[in-house]
Image: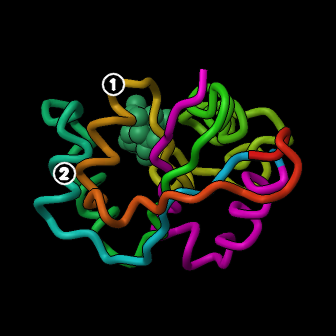
Amino acid sequence: MTERSFVAIKPDGVERKLTGEIIKRIEQKGFKMVAMKFIKPSQELAEEHYGEHKEKPFYKGLVEFITSGPVVAMVWEGKDVIATIRKMVGVTDPLKSDPGTIRGDFGISIGRNIIHASDKLESAKKEISLWFSQDELVEYTPTLDKWIY
Ligand code: RTP
Ligand code: MG
């Protein structure tokens, strides 16, 4: 199914200059970029984004970290993009992520795992509307072959 996913390169990924590498991987997979911005998230945005983890012991540190520096926030579109990008990202703990995944190739620490990606359709919709206004989602049709998104 064609759908959209919210992806964010976290402050550690930006600081380690992995932005180009990560965008390259998602582009080369074949997905279509719909939106992108470089921002230092506010406290409110971060708290809302990770709201599902409010009661967890790592919540405060997680919000502190995600607001500590700039992130690259993006929306990507394509067939099964949500599950596919999660697969490309790896599991939450980089040490348990397979080589070939973003966290498996570049991460060590669960609290510094480089990238966020929506885990299901419902979260993707919520996250896209939280991070982007409607007019920041760019409508366009690629003019290349039909099989390229
Ligand atoms: P994300 O939401 O950031 O894409 O990561 P995720 O789905 O793989 O993991 P999730 O369970 O949603 O957790 C959100 C972030 O919280 C940090 N975390 N720390 N046990 C811990 O110390 C712990 N568990 C989770 C991670 O940075 C994780 O990405
Ligand atoms: Mg998550």
* Occupied quadrant, residue 90: top right
Q: What is the span of residues highlighted in magenta in the rendered image?
A: 1-28
| Residue 8 colored in magenta in the image | yes
Residue ID at (22%, 36%): 57
Which quadrant of the figure has residue 24? Answer: bottom right
Residue 95, numbered label? none
Residue drawn at point x = 68 percent, y = 39 percent = 95
Q: Of the numbered discs in the image, which one, if any, rests on residue 122?
A: 1
Q: Is residue 89 positioned above or below 52 on the image?
A: below
> Which quarter is ligand 2 in?
top left
Q: Nearer the viewer, mark 1 or mark 2?
A: 1
- Residue 71 placement: quadrant: bottom left
At a point 33% along the width and 63% down the height, the residue shown is 65
- Disc 1 from disc 2: Cα separation: 24 Å
Rate crowding at label 1 as few (under 14), some (14 to 19) or many (20 or more) other CA atoms within 10 Å: few
Q: Which mark is residue 60?
A: 2
Q: Amino acid at mark 1?
A: Glu
Percent coordinates x, y for residue 8 in the rendering: 48, 57
**Is disc 1 in contact with disc 2, using a CB cutoff of under 8 Å?**
no
Label 1 C-beta lies within 8 Å of the nearest ligand 2 atom = no
**Residue at 50% from the left image edge and 42% from the top image edge:** 117
Task: Tell me which label, 1 or 2, sits earlier in the chain.
Answer: 2
Q: Is residue 104 magenta?
A: no
Q: Left or right? Give the position of 47 relative to 39.
A: left
| Residue toward you, 143 or 131 | 143
Percent x, y for residue 131?
29, 57
Q: Residue 138, how many percent across, how many down?
A: 47, 62
Disc 2 marks a residue whose amino acid type is Lys
Neighbour tally class for label 2: few under 14, some 14-19, many 20 plus, Cα within 10 Å? some
Across and down, in percent, residue 33 comes to 60, 57
